[in-house]
Amino acid sequence: MKNKRNTLQKRIVSDVFCSMNNHPSATMVYEAVCEKYPGISKATVYRLLAEAAEEGKVQRLKLTEADDRFDITTKKHYHVVCRECGAVADVDVEVDDAGLANSAVGHQGFAIDGCHVEFIGICEGCQKN
């Protein structure tokens, strides 16, 4: 098992990530890290975000038509994605993936073991433009 040390780079990436409130992609986090700490490599930022997701410290979002995003909120919840600018936001509704998955059992011969719900629309900023 790898040693999960709390390195300076890990703290820097974590601090920068936690200061961002827009479900950033790894590239967004890397760019923000580079503004303050240009010596940290892109590979290091990507690796540390992937490790944080594997450890359950952040949630990795695999969204349709968008780069993977990362969310500080790890409890199960839905998201809405702007189809114009790619902005991502939380949707504050009750999560019922089990009920939704149960209603799909047996369709087309599939054995359902989960589901992914994502809302798509146009954010307030893009509506104004």
Image (cartoon, helix red, strand yellow):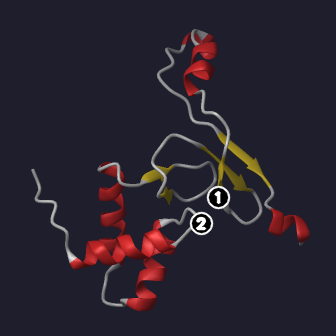
In the rendered structure, the answer to whether residue 76 lies left or right of residue 86 reads left
- Discs 2, 1 touching: Cβ within 8 Å: yes
Q: Disc number at residue 47?
A: none
| Front-lying residue, 5 or 113 | 5
Query: Residue 5's spot in the image, x, y percent?
Result: 15, 66
Q: Residue at x 35, y 54 (%)?
A: 57
Q: Residue at x 29, y 50 (%)?
A: 55
For mark 1, give the secondary structure: strand
Which amino acid does the dot numbered 1 rest on?
Val
Q: Residue at x 32, y 80 (%)?
A: 41
Judged from this view, the residue extending furthest toward the right is 128
> To which residue does mark 1 refer?
88
Q: Identify whether 2 is placed above or below 75.
A: below
Count residues near mark 2 (Cα–Cα under 10 Å), then give few for <14, some for 14-19, many for 20+: some
Q: Disc number at residue 22?
A: 2
For mark 2, give the secondary structure: loop
Query: Residue 42's spot in the image, x, y percent?
Result: 36, 76
Q: Identify whether 102 is placed above or below 62.
A: above
In the rendered structure, the answer to whether residue 73 lies left or right of residue 128 reads left
Q: Which numbered disc flags the more N-terminal residue, 2 or 1?
A: 2
| 3D distance between C-alphas at marks 2 and 1 | 7 Å
Query: Residue 129's spot in the image, x, y percent?
Result: 89, 72
In the rendered structure, the answer to whether residue 105 lies left or right of residue 52 reads right
Which amino acid does the dot numbered 2 rest on?
Asn
Query: Residue 7's spot in the image, x, y percent?
Result: 20, 74
In the rendered structure, the answer to whether residue 88 lies left or right of residue 19 reads right
| Front-lying residue, 11 or 45 | 11
